Image (tube, coloured by chain):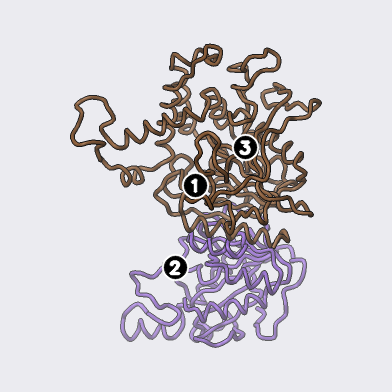
Amino acid sequence: MTALDLVTPAAGGTWRFPADEPLRLDSGAVLDGLEIGYQTYGQLNVDKSNAVLICHALTGDQHVASAHPVTGKPGWWTRLIGPGKPLDPARHFIICSNVIGGCMGSTGPASINPATGKPYGLTFPVITIGDMVRAQAMLVKALGVETLFAVIGGSMGGMQAQQWAVEYPERVFSIVVLASASRHSAQNIAFHEVGRQAIMADPDWRGGAYADHGVRPEKGLAVARMAAHITYLSEPALQRKFGRELKRDGLSWGFDADFQVESYLRHQGASFVDRFDANSYLYITRATDYFDIAAGHGGVLAKAFTAARDVRFCVLSFTSDWLYPTAESRHLVRALTAAGARAAFAEIESDKGHDAFLLDEPVMDAALAGFLSSAERDRGLI
Amino acid sequence: MTDIAIREDFREILRLVRPGSRVLDVGCGEGALLDLLTQEKQVDGRGLEISASGVAACMARGLSVVQGDADQDLDHFPDRSFDYAVLSQTLQATRNPRHVLDELLRIADRAIVSFPNFGHWRVRWSLLSRGRMPETKALPMPWWSTPNIHLCTLADFMALTEDLNLRVDASAAFAGQGAARPMNPVSAVENWRTETCLFMLSRNGAAPSREPPPVSGDLFDG
């Protein structure tokens, strides 16, 4: 990764909902004065036909192609976005926003509740993927975009992309869903529950009001991240990367991080707490657990997509992804097929696990680049 | 499954398909036929392909292709969602050809199906003279590695179409590198001389399609 891979954001910052337009949530609660942190790259063309919305995953954020302000690391999807890449700021107007409930500029549990002047903490309402998408739709409109050329996301981002097709089929031309699912499985919910319990078991969590006490449940959040991180990898990937390698010569005959894999996970946990809020982790994992598109359509997934017949879908899964296995993507694709939508689907051979969608997978790159460029031709962009 | 035979297949299919129609290509490979049909006949094409690399190649061509196979994934398509369902040189490699053929004509008004004729004289001769499973131009692989698990003769296929109450709208024969020629599918002679055959089928008593099938001088209208 060189500095050349980074894209200068065209604009970004925080967008505030108009005072007379509160966001009505699926839970029935209403959020006033909602703020959304976002970044854009490239320019909207005269026809307003080149806008792409990138939806980030669970712990991602809007810094998709430029350096992260906290960690200084490159954007999380510079493999896809940049000069000469499938999404090129020279041709596309790329938007990425922090989900509501998040902690990178969008209103979330760490934000100040205007009614009390104190952080929301657990008084923040439970949010859904649908709420996230409705907030994005407001931002997109405010940026002058009527119809998006593409909505693209992996994992939880893929859930948002599907939700776009369900709620705003007339406002999207194409949709890319990577390593995702149309509902959270019992196993998905179970892993999230482990993470949440780890956070809540930390004495510094203080019933969610840790900000009032000037502390943070860093240990609990780190453990949540460690457990989750294992689910993003695969057994072969862990074995290849670490095997049984020791951190130093010999065993400690104690509980220090003897093995490289322990040290790696501890590092993942420790660095995560620098950039992520524990309560946000609770709310966002909850939103994905509640996600079940079919449930809102009489239990029939295909019914959710009947209005999305003209939308082009690209769905990709990975052989070693056990978090959102191929069966989940196939379930989505069959529903799209039954709904008469234009769906393309492939299961990519990879041993990198769930995170493969962010990594070097040439077949995925070829499929995605091909899908996008043909959609661009049909859209009259090239 | 030689390239030449498949290319002749394509030419024939191109001739049969109405412009602007909806086509499902089952086992579409890298999308060559769908591409041809999209360009020449402006069809709304979809594909089903078993290999990820084939699907990726199709996506790169802008084709809507889903990874899956004829045996398992046809069930998920709605009734009559296509004008044509194409199954090129694949029927004999499916687990349940009868079900697949039935499904093709549930999904589409017309099925276009091609397969190698196991009644061809070279096949019969190979079995009779050498007592070995035939390896011919149309069936080039040894018995232990061939994907063709349900081979049939022209007469067998006609019996199946009767069993399923299907109508033959068009039929053609191919041999070697030659172009398609008209073929009478119920002729015993054709069962000897036809190496690869292609059919367009519809259900007897089914509602007529919006337009009659194209009339081609080269084709025998059954």
Question: In the picture shown, does residue A271 fall above or below B7?
Answer: above
Residue to which mark 2 is pinned: B150
Residue to which mark 3 is pinned: A293
Residue B203 — which label? Answer: none
Which residue appears at 63% of the width and 14% of the height?
A118
Question: In the picture shown, does residue A192 fall above or below B39?
Answer: above
- Mark 1 element type: helix
Residue A358 — which label? Answer: 1
Q: Residue furthest right?
A: A20
Chain identifier of the residue bearing label 1 in the image: A
- Mark 3 element type: helix
Amino acid of disc 2: His
Which residue appears at 54% of the width and 22% of the height?
A279
**What colour do you see for chain B?**
purple
Which residue appears at 65% of the width and 26% of the height?
A107
Both marks 3 and 1 on one chain = yes
Residue B48 located left or right of residue A200: right
Both marks 2 and 1 on one chain = no
Circles 2, 3 touching at the beta carbon (< 8 Å): no
**Which label lies toward us, 2 or 1?**
1
- Mark 2 element type: loop
